[in-house]
Image (tube, rainbow, N blue to C red):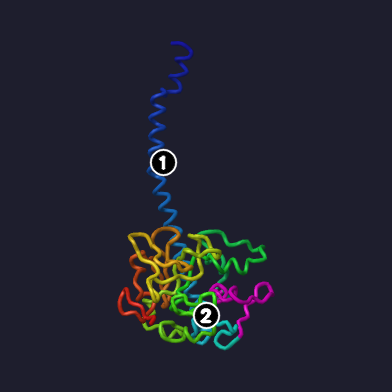
C-alpha cells in the first residue's frame, strides 16, 4: 500500500462518508433550531408573565396608597390628580405633561427597577439621553387598559373612543371608566395590563414596538379584531394593541392580581376590558 493509501486508512473516512456525516449534522441542526427557538420563546414568555404580575402588584400598592384610586391613563389637564398637583421627579427635576402622565411614573415607587421590569422585548432606552424620561415612558413591553381603567384626559386624545375631553375629566367620570378599586365588579375578569405593540402610532412609536396603553377591541366602534393568531387593526387610531412579543399569546394581568397568557381570540371579548359589557361584542360607551 502506498504512503497516500496508508494516510487514507488512518483517517478512516472517505469523501462520501464525510458528506453523509455533514448531511446528518445539517439535518440535526434543522431539527434542533426550531426547538431551541421555542425554548427561548417559552423562557421569555415565562419572564414576561413574572414581570406583568409584579406590575399588577405595583398597581395594587399604588391604589392602597391613593385611597383606592387606580392610576390614570392621563391625568387632568389642570395638572391635578385626585385634587393634588401632579409632581413626578426624575433625578431632582420635576416632570410634567405627557411624561409624568404615563403609568410607569405612577408605579415607579413600587418596584425595584421599573424600567428593567417593563422592557423585555428591547433594551431600556438610553438613560444618558436628555429625553430619557419621555422616551422610557412611551414604548414599554406592557400597556395598561387605561381606556376603561383609569381613563384619559388630554387634548391629544380628544375624541379618542369618545372618552376624552379637551377641557377636563368630566367625560371620563363614571360610566364605562373605573376610577376606584371598588368599582371593579369582577376583578378576576378585568384586564389591567397586557403585552402591547404599537400600531399606527406615527411619531410616538414605530409599528411593532411596545406601547404604554392598550386599545381594547371595542370602544364606541370596533378598533381591532382577532383573525386566527393575528390581531388586525380596523381603526386607524394611534395606540397599542395586545400582541405578544414572544409568541401569538400576550401576557395579561387582571385586576385581582393574577396573570394569564391570552390568545388573540380570547382577548377579543370586551367583557374582559370593562365589567360593564354584557356580551363579547358589546360596548358600554353611549
Q: Residue 79 bears which disc, if any?
A: none
Residue linked to disc 1 = 29
Q: Earlier in the sequence, mark 1 or mark 2?
A: 1
State the residue at coordinates (58%, 62%).
Answer: 124
Question: Looking at the image, which is closer to me, 261 or 36?
Answer: 261
CB-based contact (under 8 Å), mark 1 and mark 2: no
Question: Looking at the image, which is closer to me, 41 or 206?
Answer: 206
State the residue at coordinates (48%, 69%).
Answer: 143
- From the viewer's perspective, is the residue at label 1 or at label 2 nearer? 2
Residue 92, x across and y down, in percent: 69, 75
In the image, residue 23 lies in the stretch drawn in magenta: no
Indicate the secondary structure of the residue bearing disc 1.
helix
State the residue at coordinates (64%, 66%).
Answer: 131
Indicate the secondary structure of the residue bearing disc 2.
loop
Residue 176, x across and y down, in percent: 41, 82
Residue 90, x across and y down, in percent: 65, 73
Mark 2 neighbour class, 10 Å CA radius: few under 14, some 14 to 19, many 20 or more: many
Q: Quadrant for residue 75, please give it.
A: bottom right
Magenta range: 85-107
Residue linked to disc 2 = 153
Q: Dividing the image into 4 quarters, which one contains the N terminus?
A: top left
Amino acid at each position: 500500500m502506498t504512503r497516500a493509501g496508508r494516510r487514507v486508512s488512518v483517517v478512516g473516512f472517505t469523501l462520501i462518508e464525510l458528506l453523509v456525516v455533514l448531511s446528518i449534522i445539517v439535518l440535526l441542526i434543522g431539527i434542533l433550531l426550531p426547538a431551541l427557538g421555542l425554548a427561548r420563546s417559552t423562557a421569555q414568555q415565562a419572564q414576561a408573565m413574572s414581570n406583568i404580575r409584579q406590575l399588577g402588584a405595583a398597581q395594587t400598592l399604588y391604589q392602597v396608597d391613593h385611597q383606592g384610586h387606580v392610576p390614570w391613563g392621563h391625568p387632568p389637564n389642570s395638572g391635578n390628580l385626585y385634587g393634588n398637583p401632579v409632581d413626578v421627579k426624575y433625578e431632582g427635576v420635576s416632570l410634567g405633561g405627557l411624561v409624568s402622565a404615563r403609568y410607569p411614573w405612577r408605579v415607579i415607587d413600587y418596584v425595584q427597577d421599573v424600567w428593567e421590569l417593563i422592557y423585555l422585548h428591547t433594551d431600556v432606552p438610553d438613560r444618558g439621553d436628555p429625553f430619557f424620561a419621555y422616551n422610557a415612558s412611551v414604548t414599554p413591553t406592557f400597556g395598561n387598559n387605561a381606556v376603561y381603567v383609569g381613563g384619559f384626559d388630554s387634548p391629544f386624545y380628544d375624541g379618542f373612543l369618545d372618552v376624552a375631553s379637551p377641557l377636563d375629566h368630566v367625560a371620563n367620570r363614571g360610566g364605562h371608566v373605573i376610577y376606584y378599586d371598588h368599582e371593579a365588579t369582577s376583578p378576576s375578569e378585568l384586564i389591567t395590563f397586557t403585552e402591547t405593540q404599537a400600531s399606527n402610532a406615527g411619531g410616538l412609536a414605530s409599528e411593532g414596538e411596545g406601547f404604554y396603553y392598550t386599545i381594547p377591541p371595542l370602544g364606541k366602534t370596533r378598533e381591532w379584531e382577532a383573525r386566527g393568531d393575528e390581531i388586525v387593526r380596523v381603526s386607524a387610531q394611534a395606540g397599542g394593541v395586545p400582541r405578544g412579543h414572544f409568541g401569538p399569546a400576550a401576557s395579561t394581568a387582571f385586576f385581582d392580581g393574577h396573570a394569564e397568557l391570552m390568545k388573540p381570540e380570547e382577548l377579543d371579548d370586551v367583557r374582559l376590558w370593562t365589567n360593564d359589557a354584557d356580551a363579547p361584542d358589546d360596548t358600554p360607551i353611549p
